[in-house]
Image (spheres, grey):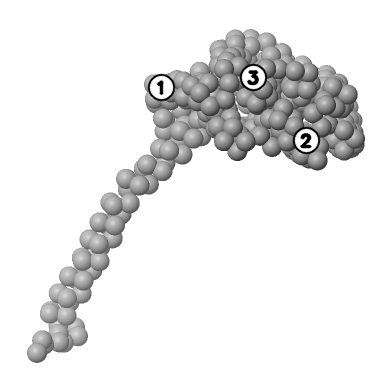
């Protein structure tokens, strides 16, 4: 029979110390075992952050309706899956190259200081290799599983965004947003080409909608972070001109977006676009235009501009307009 230590005795204190040491050792062992998994998750999260997944989500919103228009309904699930996967990898590659080249100015901007490269979570060399791997993988995947035209368009979009926009236009002209609108609208063409292997007027019109839409969308965001762009010497429009001028141009491009969206009915009637989409385009377009004018009015009156209101409305506009295309294509 084992003797029970008398409370307060040396034996009892020894048992308490031993139990405490054992418990601490077990916790340390558990912590050490968790370290590799935690480090792996952090590293994986850093690489994913390089691809700017929130931007990719917005781009893919326009790919699906383009594919459904081309297929006059649902394309095969296999084609849809591989097109979205290839498009995600291609957009991610372009964004990684953008992060790689912009790592110097990202250190200066409060909004971007915590990105993986300026924060040191990922090395510049590793990011560059990652971008190359994503590029090759996305182009090869689209070429094998969809069409060569879709793969070529994806390759062109990566090059345009990574080289022409990031390295040339962004730092040297106030019109960088307009130039950058080309690769931003490319998912529409890629989605259509993945289904048909060709291009036609309907995807070109939808491309025009997404292209025009990017100006009020991104200039509203740039107004919010004007000081950040100025600190990094990036000549975004709100940095180099007056708020009134930016407001006027936002209004003009919003009207252009809505006008182009109304061309889809006469040019895509054979693909299922009809009155349902057109009514949605008119209603959503009116909402978008009214919000743009409200921003301009706040600017001219010297009130608080609140540009993020238009920014969020623009996201809802494009998403709901895409839903309108999908519904008309199905019905």
Please give the label number shown on residue 220.
none
- Camera-side residue: 288 or 104? 288
* Residue drawn at (15%, 87%) of the image: 4
Q: Is residue 11 visible?
A: yes
* Residue denoted by label 3: 197
- In percent of width and height, residue 262 lies at 87, 26
Q: Which quadrant, please, contains the C terminus?
A: top right
Marks 3/2: CA distance? 19 Å
Q: Secondary structure at mark 3?
A: loop
Left/right placement of residue 100 relative to residue 218 reads left
* Residue denoted by label 1: 129
Q: Is residue 223 visible?
A: no
* Residue drawn at (25%, 56%) of the image: 29
- Camera-side residue: 54 or 304? 54
* Residue denoted by label 2: 329
- In percent of width and height, residue 120 lies at 42, 30
Marks 2/1: CA distance? 40 Å
């Amino acid at each position: 029979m084992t003797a029970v230590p008398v409370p307060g005795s040396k034996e009892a204190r020894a048992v308490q110390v031993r139990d405490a040491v054992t418990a601490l050792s077990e916790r340390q062992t558990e912590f050490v075992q968790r370290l590799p998994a935690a480090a792996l998750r952090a590293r994986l999260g850093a690489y994913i952050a390089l691809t700017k997944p929130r931007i990719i989500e917005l781009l893919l919103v326009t790919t699906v309706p383009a594919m459904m228009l081309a297929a006059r309904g649902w394309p095969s699930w296999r084609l849809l899956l591989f097109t979205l996967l290839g498009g995600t990898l291609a957009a991610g590659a372009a964004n990684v190259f953008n992060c790689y080249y912009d790592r110097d100015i990202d250190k200066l901007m409060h909004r971007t200081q915590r990105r993986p490269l300026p924060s040191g979570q990922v090395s510049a060399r590793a990011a560059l290799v990652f971008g190359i791997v994503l590029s090759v993988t996305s182009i090869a995947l689209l070429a094998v599983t969809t069409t060569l035209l879709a793969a070529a368009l994806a390759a062109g979009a990566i090059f345009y965004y990574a080289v022409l926009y990031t390295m040339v236009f962004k730092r040297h002209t106030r019109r960088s947003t307009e130039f950058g609108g080309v690769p931003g609208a490319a998912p529409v063409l890629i989605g259509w080409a993945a289904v048909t292997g060709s291009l036609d007027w309907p995807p070109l019109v939808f491309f025009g909608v997404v292209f025009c839409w990017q100006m009020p969308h991104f200039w509203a965001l740039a107004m919010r972070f004007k000081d950040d762009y100025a600190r990094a010497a990036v000549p975004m429009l709100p940095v180099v001109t007056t708020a009134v001028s930016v407001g006027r141009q936002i209004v003009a491009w919003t009207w252009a977006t809505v006008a182009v969206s109304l061309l889809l009915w006469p040019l895509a009637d054979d693909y299922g676009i009809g009155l349902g989409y057109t009514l949605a385009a008119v209603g959503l377009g009116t909402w978008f235009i009214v919000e743009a004018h409200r921003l301009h009015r706040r600017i001219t009156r010297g009130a608080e501009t609140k540009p993020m209101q238009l920014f969020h409305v623009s996201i809802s506009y494009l998403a709901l307009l895409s839903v309108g295309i999908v519904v008309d294509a199905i019905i």
